[in-house]
Each structure stands twice: as C-alpha cells, then as structure tokens.
Image (spheres, rainbow, N blue to C red):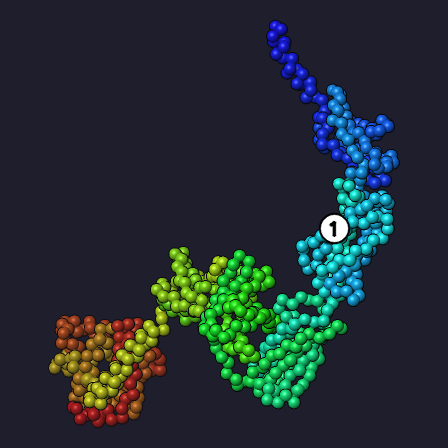
Amino acid sequence: MWAWTLWMLPLLCRFGLADLPAKPENISCVFYYTKNFTCTWSPEKEANSISYTVRRTLCYVRENDTCNSTSKAGSSCSFYSSLTPPDIYIIQVEAKNAYGIIKSDITYWDLTTITKIEPPKISSVKPVLGLKQMVQIKWTQPVLAPKSSTLNYTLRFRAVNSTHWMEVNFTRSGKNEEEAYNLTGLQAFTEYVVALQCVVHKSRFWSGWSQEKMGVTVEEAPHGLDLWRVLRSDKVDGKRPVQLLLKKAKGAPVLEKVLGYKIQYFPENNSNLRETMNTTNQQPELYLGNQTYWVHVRSYNSLGESPEATLRIPAIDEKLFHCIEAMHTCLTQDQLVVEWQSSALEVDTWMVEWVPDVDSKPSAISWESVSHARNWTIQQDELEPFWCYNISVYPMLQNLVGEPYSIQAYVKEGVPSEGPETKVENIGVRTVTITWKEIPKRHRNGFINNYTIFYQAEDGKEFSKTVNSSILQYDLESLTRKTSYTVQVMASTSAGGINGTGINFKTLSISVFEIFLVTSLVGGGLLILIILTVVYGIKKPNKLKHLCWPDVPNPAESSIATWCGDDFKGKLNLKEFDDSVNREDGILKPCYSPNDFIDKLVVNFENFLEVVSAENPGKGCENILGGEKNEYVASPNRPYCPTVSTEIPPRGPQCLSSGMLEGTCPETRERLLPPTQGCGPDHLCEEGAPNPYLKNSVTTREFLVSEKLPEQIHREV
C-alpha cells in the first residue's frame, strides 16, 4: 500500500503543477527617454486568466515599485515615473492564477544601454553651389534626446531610379539642435533619396528611420552624343527627307539637362552651302538633295556644349557595301542575343536597329551602337512579350555605312489571339478548295509554324492536313458526293495553336464536267442524226418526203366497193332501204349506221363507186355528191350528217361482203339501215352511238370534194 502511494505521489504533484501559470521568460526592457520604462516577456498569451506583477527595484537605494497587467492586455507593462540614467534597475515578473504564483528570474537593466530616442527630422537636401557631385543634408535632433549625450547617426541614400541603398555612419555631440552633413561621391544631375536614424552612445536601441527626403545634384555640361539617321524613300518638293535620331552617348551618365541641339549640314562637295538648325526635338527631320551630305550635331545646356557628333549621309545612288553573311537570334534566361557573321575583318563597329512590327502606324525606332563585337544583347523586360521585332544590323567602316541585314524575333511567344478567317471555294463532287487569310500581326503572338486543316463529314470521322506557314490554301480531295462537311483551320506557334471559325459546305451531286460530257454526247448524237438525215434526204428526197409528209388518201378518189363481190348488183336490194330513206323531194337524209356497216364500208369505197357508176352513170354521181362543187362528204360514223340528194334504183337483196353468209342478208340490211325516225331534211340524226374503234379512222374526217371527181369516176368506169 505504501509503495503504491509513493509511486502515485509524483504524478499528483505533476498534475498540480500543470495548473499553475507558465513561468515568465525572455524579459526585455526599453527606456523610452522621458516617456516610459517598458518591459515585455513571454509567453505572449495564456489560455487562462492570469495577472502579472512587474516589480522594479532601484539597485542602489532599494526603492521599488510595481506595475500590474493581465494576460488579456498582453505580456507587457510600462512604468511612467521619471527616470534618469545611469541608474540600474532590478526587474522580476510574477504570474498568478487560482492555483498559485510563479516568479521569473531576476534581471538587471542599465538605463544607459536601453535608452531609445525618436528619429531625427530632415529639413533639407540641397546641392552646394560650385561643388559637383555633392548634396548637403540638414536635420533637427529629436526633442526628447539627452542633451549631453553623444549621438551616433546612420545616413542611407539611393538614386531615385535605383533600389539599392547605401549607408554612411557618423557621430555628433548632440549639443546643437540643428545638424548638417555633406554627402559626396554622387553623380551630377541625379536625384537622390536620403533617410536618417540615430542612437544614444552605448545604447543598443536605434531610433526609427526618419521620413525620406529627396534632392538633386548639380548638373554638368553635356557629355557625348550618339547620332543616327533614317533614310526615307519618298520625296517632298524634290528633296529626300532624312530623319535624325539623337540620344545620350552609350555609357555616358545623365549628368545634365539638355536644353537643345545645334545642327549643321552641308553637301560633301560644297561646304559653303552650310545650313544651321536649332531644335529641342530628339528626332528632327532634314530635307536634303540627292548628293552626299555631312551632318554635325551638338547638345547644350546652361553650363556648356557637348562634343560634336558627325554623320555622313550617302548619296541617293551610292552603292552600299555588303559584309554580313548570316544572322540569328537566341533566347537565354532573361536576355535576347543577336549574333551575326562577317568576313570583313576591318569592320569593327555596327549599328543595331529594332522596331516593333505592327499593323498600325510605324513605331519609334530604337537603336544602339556596338563596337569590338559581333553580337548584341538586350534584356527581355525591355521588349514587349508577344510582339514581333524587326532587328537590323548596319556595318560601319569609318564614315561609310554598309548594307543592313535584317531578322525578326520574339522575346516570348504565345498562342495566337484568334484563328484564321476561312473560306470555301470551287466546290465540286469530290474536291473543294479551302482558303484562309493570314492572322493580323498584332494577334499572332509568335511565328506561325504551320496551318492544320480539320474537316469532317456529317456523322463521320474527322481528318486533318498540315501545311507550312507559307501556304494559304489547300485542295481537299477524295470527298464523298452530295455530303455535308464541316471545316476549320488551326494556326500554330511554338506555344500552341488556335482554331478559326468552322464553316459548312456540301459537295455537288454532279460535276460541271459530267454535265458538259452528257450534254456533249446528247448534242453530238443529235448532230450526227441531223447530218445523216440531211444526207439521206439529199440522196433519196422522195422517200424522205414520204416519210416526213405521208400522203393522206382522198376519200373521193378511194374505192369502197371492193369489199362487195361481183354479184353486188344482184344481191343488193335497195328496196330494203325504202323504210329508212325519206324520199321527200328526192333528197337522201343522213342517219346513223351500225358499227359493222361502218367497218365494212371502209373496205373499198372506190369499188362501191364503180358499181354505182356502172348501174346508173352520171346519176349516181350526181346523187351521191349532191350535184354541187367542193362540198363536204361526211363520214358515216359522224353524228351530224348534212343532207345529200340521191336517187337509188331498186335493187335485189345482195350480200354486203364476200365473207358474210347469204342467209343473213335481210337481217344485216335491217341492222345496217334502221328507221330514221325524227330525221327530217333539215335535222340531225340523234340516235346511235359513235364507234370508239373508229374514232381516229380516216372515215371520221371531213374531206373537201374535188371539182373533177365526176370526170375521174366516169373515166374509171
């Protein structure tokens, strides 16, 4: 039992200690001169509510005071009673909660080493007249700084266009309220930013930095000047315009403010024709003749002029020398490098031009001189990404300028902003021509490496064809007849590609060639047929005439009686027709006939006329033809029958056809010649139906009776 109790006692003590507050550690005290004495410790925050008591004891007189704080207010506490260095204080912090009190270790603090004062206030930063590369900084000491203490200062400065700070340390006694310091070793005509901080001697706490102040050093006379030109091809009033490009010489510091430029120019063969121009424009334009000119330029300010820059302008017809064989570009991590090859060892100076290649108005040309090298480097951040730049290199041999070599480059490529504009042309049965336009330069974002044509039939598989960037049209072949297709073109750079807008088209069902072929075959066949017909007509005109215009038989000249036998006169009894013939006034009335009679009547009308003529010559013709010239003879099958005057002698019964039986003659007469009730001399026969079998028979036609018909009949008899 006692062994168990001894074993549990440390655990119980540990749980009890866990409820006490944490011991304050890392105590730090700062003496803000004439303001307060502040101490801080850790931990900064506690989960439970804890009260802190900071006990401060003066080391020599054993006087003490306390400062109270809570964990909610933070782990710091300040004494506001006045203190005077060089006193030494003892600091101890107590933490108390409901479970007990924990005290920190005792610490000692010398006010001289922990004094912290306010930063100084800079009043001015100005150059000193007559002294170059220097500015004078003036400031006021902190109001609450110890008057008798020595102060250490740190001055930091930098140029406005730089991010690198430089520092200078110096000491002042602190007896004067206003102090000054001359900062030397600066560049002329350069703006600088300065700031100050100070600390009491032997103290380890520096003040904060003062508010920054700016000042400019004195300028100097202009330094060197670089000069270049741009030759224009057009002319103005018969003179060629030449644009001059002026800037600070490479490597020369900007130590002055240029007020203007003095320009002198004259022909090479006549220096007396010297002209002068005074301008503030860095890109002035001159109008020169066709001959060679010399140009001299100086920049100036209030302190003097720069050295003279000279440039030779070649004659308009001067032949430039060529010495650059090849040039290429490459990209490093943050630079664009242009390298060229030249066989002319005597040429050691080059002029490099670069300008953005954009669709809008020409941009300003940038340029730089290169010596003792055959390469040129520029930082990538100095060029715009996704912009194409035209870079040209001019060789320079003394005052002569050679023929340039140009190349294009991107510092960074991207996917084009838009795809090509596509069109469909020459749509055929199995072929079509796809054309597209180049993407505008401002939307390319890089070099176009190739174009890819994607095309797909309706509900079919997609196909693609890739061509190089110089091709702007492509003929698609092996398409399906009468099929809808979708096509689009993708433009690709090294960074990727983008598709243009898709367009639809449908192949033809028949081609123009096929139409032409069919038309040619049909037309050729017709032409051959016409030629053969004409040849046949020339050789046999009568047969062609008979074939094209066949003879229509004249009913008046035909023989209808051949269907009767030789005994037609004896067997035909015309008396059987008395019931159907109206003999009033001796006129034969029209009437309808049976269909078989019409069929038999067509057999040979000419024989019938012969028989009748033999029986009663002259009278029969008069009766049948009506005795009048050019009258119409109606077909027996026509419903309308004009009256015909005739006399028919009585005849005995006779068969109407050799193919008919004799016993059937009376019945046949009755069937052929029915009673004509209601048929008067001026009326039509209304009974009987027309025979459809003979609807188009020649017997249904009306014929014009010839005047010579009686004579012809009489001659035949």
At label 1, the amino acid type is Asn
Q: Residue at point 52% right, 63% down?
A: 337
Q: State the residue in front, 63 or 462.
A: 63
One can see residue 27 in this view: yes
Q: Can you give x and y, in whole percent of width and height, for residue 345 in the image?
A: 48, 73
Q: Quadrant of the N terminus?
A: top right
Q: Residue at point 49% right, 58% down?
A: 495
Residue 411, relative to residue 633: is it above or below?
above
Of all residues, the one furthest to the left in this rendering is 566
Q: Quadrant of the C terminus?
A: bottom left
| Residue 153 located left or right of residue 163 | right
Q: State the residue in front, 244 or 657.
A: 244
Q: Residue at point 17% right, 93% down?
A: 715
Q: Can you give x and y, in whole percent of width and height, for residue 234 in the image?
A: 58, 83
Q: For the residue carrying disc 1, how many other residues have a C-alpha within 10 Å: few (<14), some (14-19), or many (20+)?
A: few
Q: Residue at point 50% right, 75% down?
A: 346
| Residue 273 located left or right of residue 108 | left
Q: State the residue in front, 474 or 7.
A: 7
Q: Can you give x and y, in whole percent of width and height, for residue 113 in the image?
A: 78, 38
Which residue is label 1 attached to? 169
Dividing the picture into quarters, in which one does residue 398 lie?
bottom right
Q: Can you give x and y, in whole percent of width and height, for residue 369 in the image?
A: 58, 71
